[in-house]
Image (spheres, rainbow, N blue to C red):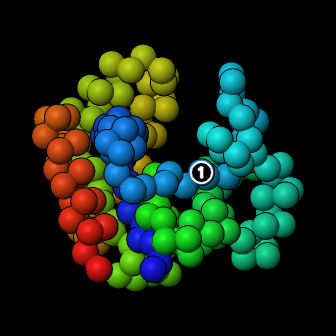
Amino acid sequence: MNGKLIILSAPSGSGKSTIINHILQKGLPLRFSVSATSRPPRGKERDGVEYYFLSPETFRERIEKGDFIEYEEVYPDRFYGTLKSEVDEKLQKGENVIMDVDVAGGLNIKKLYGERALLVFIQPPSMEELKRRLEKRRTDSPEIIADRISKAAYELSLASRYDRVIVNDNLEKAKEETENIIIKFISHA
């Protein structure tokens, strides 16, 4: 039996990583898809665990070969993407794969995998709340926050193309709702 794909996307600051970590700790039959990046490892990050670390040149070569199901050049020479082999190998073993990708990447994956893929969009309650959360993190400059807010407006315009939209105005409720949607999806033949 082939596995299924669960793709979570959200604007930065919506709580997506927290929700994914919660889902992964629930003991569900899910494997996390490790993305590739051309940025150098940070801190104790290890190749093949947090990311597959590739040079910008290698990343470009692999794009040319068609090795990615989705990728994005976030800044010049700073790529992020999902290797086809990373996903297909797990699916062929019958494993369900959970992915954390940007909105455009999620839509591309849905085109490739159709009904085997579930797109879940985690939405902030409002742009004002999203801005407040980003400022509260104290990790980004005002310019970066402004960029993230601008990108969020674009991402929110695509939310209706996702299979399910979960408004994260209460984290515990959003975790539970996401978990229930995923359980229902993977238990349906």
| Amino acid under disc 1 | Val
**Residue 131: percent from left, percent from top:** 29, 31
**Residue 93: percent from left, percent from top:** 55, 71
Camera-side residue of 147 and 7: 7
Left or right: 36, with 114 as reference point: right
**Residue at 49% from the left image edge and 54% from the top image edge:** 31
Which image quarter is the C terminus in?
A: bottom left
**Residue at 79% from the left image edge and 76% from the top image edge:** 65
Q: Quadrant of residue 89?
A: bottom right
> Which secondary structure lies at badge 1?
loop
Count neighbours of disc 1 (C-alpha within 10 A) and say few if under 14, some if 14 to 19, many if 20 or more: many
**Above-or-below relation of 110 to 144:** below
**Is residue 69 visible to the viewer in this orientation of the structure?**
no
State the residue position of label 1. Answer: 34
Which image quarter is the N terminus in?
A: bottom left
Camera-side residue of 75 and 65: 65
**Residue at 86% from the left image edge and 56% from the top image edge:** 57
Left or right: 167, with 31 as reference point: left
Q: Quadrant of residue 180?
A: bottom left
